Image (cartoon, coloured by chain):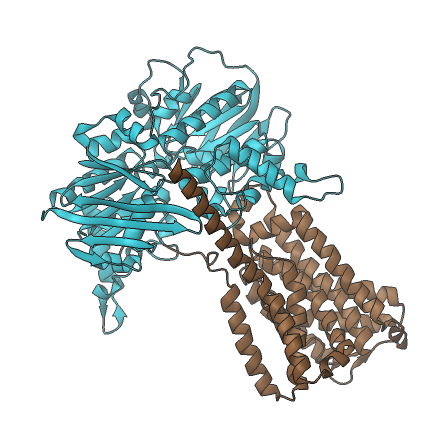
Amino acid sequence: MASQEKKEVSKEGALKKQSLINIVRSLLPVIGLVVVCLLFNILTKGGMWSSRKLILNQVYVVLISATGVFFIMTMGGLDFSQGSILGIASIVVCVLSKTNIALAVVGGIITGAVIGAVNGYFYVNRKIKSFIVTICTMFLFRGVIKYLASNSPVAASMQVYDYDTTPIKLGITVAVLAIGFVAFRFTKFGINLKAIGAGEKAVKFAGLRTDRMKFLIYVLAGAITGLAAFVNIVKNGSATANVGNQLETQILIALVLGGMPISGGAKVRFENIIVGSLLYIVLNNGLIMMGLTTQAMQLIQGVVFLIFVAIFADRENLSVIK
Amino acid sequence: MSDIRLEVKDVSKSFGITRALKRVSFNINKGEIHALIGENGSGKSTLTNSLAGIYQKDDGLFILDGKEIHPHNQLEANNEGISIIVQELGTLDGLTVAENIFLGHEEEFVKCGIKNTKAMNRKANELLKKYGFERIKAGDMIENYNFEDRKLVEIVKATYFSPKIVVIDETTTALSREGREELYKQMKRIRSEGDTVIFISHDLPEVLSLSDSITVLRDGDYIDTIKSSDVDEDGLKKLMVGREVSGNYYRADYGEEISDEVVMSVKNVTVPGLISDVSFDLHKGEILGFGGLSESGMHEIGKACFGASFDREGSVTLADGTEIKDIPTAISHSIAYTSKDRDNESLVMNQSIRDNICLPSLDGLANKARLLSDKKLEDFANTYAKKMSTKMISVNQFVSELSGGNKQKVVLARWIGKDSDILLLDSPTRGIDVKVKQDIYQLMDSMRKAGKSIIMISEELMELIGMCDRIIIMKDGKISGELRRDKDMDENSLIAKMV
């Protein structure tokens, strides 16, 4: 009896320890965000706070498109073509905005979805690894963008400036995140996605049409980035040959900074997107305001990125082979 | 005492908050087959995996021939003279048979930095021939072979270099009769050479007939080490469970009529290379058994009926005329399937027990707005995990932390939660201890009485005879005979149709 009690106590103690580690892990990105904000505000003597609107302006596109990539990474895939998707969709938005703004929004979304479908087709039906497929489509569509926008940037209709207000941009972002959060956290969509990331074969045997799901997620991620293209054009007014350049890396870094395990699976949390994107943008702007050179910035980013990957990599999930 | 091979001293190991081994100490002698028994989750595999370098023990000592050893991986353990055949698949895809056998020992065949593949294959073929596995070819890719052949390759890999200790973890249940005989022969050879076999098995008659001494673990505690000659099956069960277990755990009834109502009709089903032209009917409330040698194609029957076979011809039709062509259709028409390959096909290992149990039932658990609540999912998972008396800390624990038998309970809990009417159970008691087996048999019996239909595919003839209303025997991908439930049926009448 006494040993039974003792066992219970030690179990409880161990349970507490375990959950403490988990809490620290999940709080680290938030703590990081607060620390980085405070640090840069002190270092720039409040300069950062006064330019908060400018900083916030940069985070919308990353936040929106990171939502789609978040879904892809949850199921264990990767997507490097997001920047090119944003670029093509931005050009489409610019062209269509001269006819009708609503048409431009829809056109952007459809363009993104179509490119997502191309990714999905080669990934699912032709069974090529997602990072290979999306690197190929990244180059392919980057080439198309260069072709379309090299001579002169594609300008949008002047009308889009009417939409360049914080309520609209913030509204779209919050709407995407809210819908994404509810779907991910409170419907079978999220559980299924995480399960695919953790063990696809077994999920198939539990009755999920995994191939269809994987395809649709790539289409969805493309469509979401297509919507981000509208916000991007509202912000910039035109699409240059460099539009969307390196967005994919920004998203990837943001998600990892937010605590996302790179292999996806059961330990993924939706909060990763928001905290990560904010942390990335703040870090970036802070370094710029500090007057660092581009080279030094990349160096620091690389180090920070590496540290976070090392902390959050889900080693249990990188299947240990006996 | 110079004949002590291995001293296990105060060895402890925890996984997160689960204490799998609690200061276990005992000795293992030279030239003996030493069995390690205990219920699921008693710590047998944890102990041997720590010895073989797969896990790192938290505390305590392993003293091999008077020398402390601390293997950090399987290769280091190999070099100390310890090899292991693990419970699940221990060969690597993407390598040939020969490369798998000599994994970590390739330097024997390397000259000036260049690997002599020919010499390696030749040596591997010689070994395979010596063991009598000529049908396995050294140059073939390992994934071209089935589960059983891959186990045979593992036997070669683990024993060819005459290690001091060979650990055989729950391997026999994956093997057919011939495979087992071969394994027994190798175990006895190792013993006769003065080396030691540590043998983990749930098959108590097998343990009693093979081993010289037996160590019993229970819940991570060391219970006792006894000479096999001093104990019988009931004595062992008592030590394992800690109380008396009634001997009879199969169904007791005989002569019940099978209902005429057909719930599933299988017609001319062929899966190229595995089964050809198989037809049978499954009746309401019956347990239909499938037996045969491991390669007889019987394991594909379950997949074919579940719509999971690639390239299936022929038809599987339910009573209402629905054709089962894919898994989602099967599940939505109340069919359940548990795979022999539990870790890959039945369970999402790195996911919570909760999500594993709820996966196929998510639609039913959602509210009108199609939203799910954590509490509802947890309650659901708890209800069915508890019903199966799964040993766990909470339903939010990852499945990968559970022992083999408890994993199987999670799989069954999932389908009981789904309230499936047709259950396709492939090797449902593989690697599972007496007490859980009894639970599963009782569960099957009560499901049968509730009008559910069960197909049970098994390599254990005794459980087929004990549980099934009808037994279909498979041979070379075809049905070779059918037997009705009979009190006087014995294993030989089944074996006659198998070979």
At a point 65% along the width and 79% down the height, the residue shown is: A284
Q: Position of residue A85 (x, y in %)?
A: 70, 69
Point out residue A140 in the picture as x, y percentages from the top left corner.
Answer: 64, 72
Quadrant in which residue A133 is drawn: bottom right
Q: Position of residue A282 (x, y in %)?
A: 67, 76
In the rendered image, which quarter is residue A222 located in?
A: bottom right
What is the quadrant of the C terminus of chain A in the image? bottom left
**Figure check: B322 above or below B41:** above
How many numbered marks does the figure carry? 0
- Determine whether, in the image, residue A142 is placed left or right of residue B180: right
Instruction: Residue A144: name its quadrant.
Output: bottom right
The percent coordinates of residue B425 (x first, y second) are 47, 32
Q: Residue at x 18, y 28 (%)?
A: B230
Give the quadrant of the N terminus of chain A: top left
Which of these two is toward me, A309 or B13?
A: B13
Residue B134 or B382: which is nearer the viewer? B382
- Whether residue B110 is visible to the viewer of this picture, yes or no, is yes
Q: Colour of chain B?
A: cyan
Residue at x-position 31% and y-position 59%: B73
Residue ranking furthest to the front? A2
Query: Taking A121 as reference, is B490 above or below it?
Result: above
Output the letter for the chain in brown: A
Q: Is residue A138 visible?
A: no
Relative height, residue A116 to residue A201 (above, below): below
Q: Judge left or right: residue B499 versus residue A262.
A: left
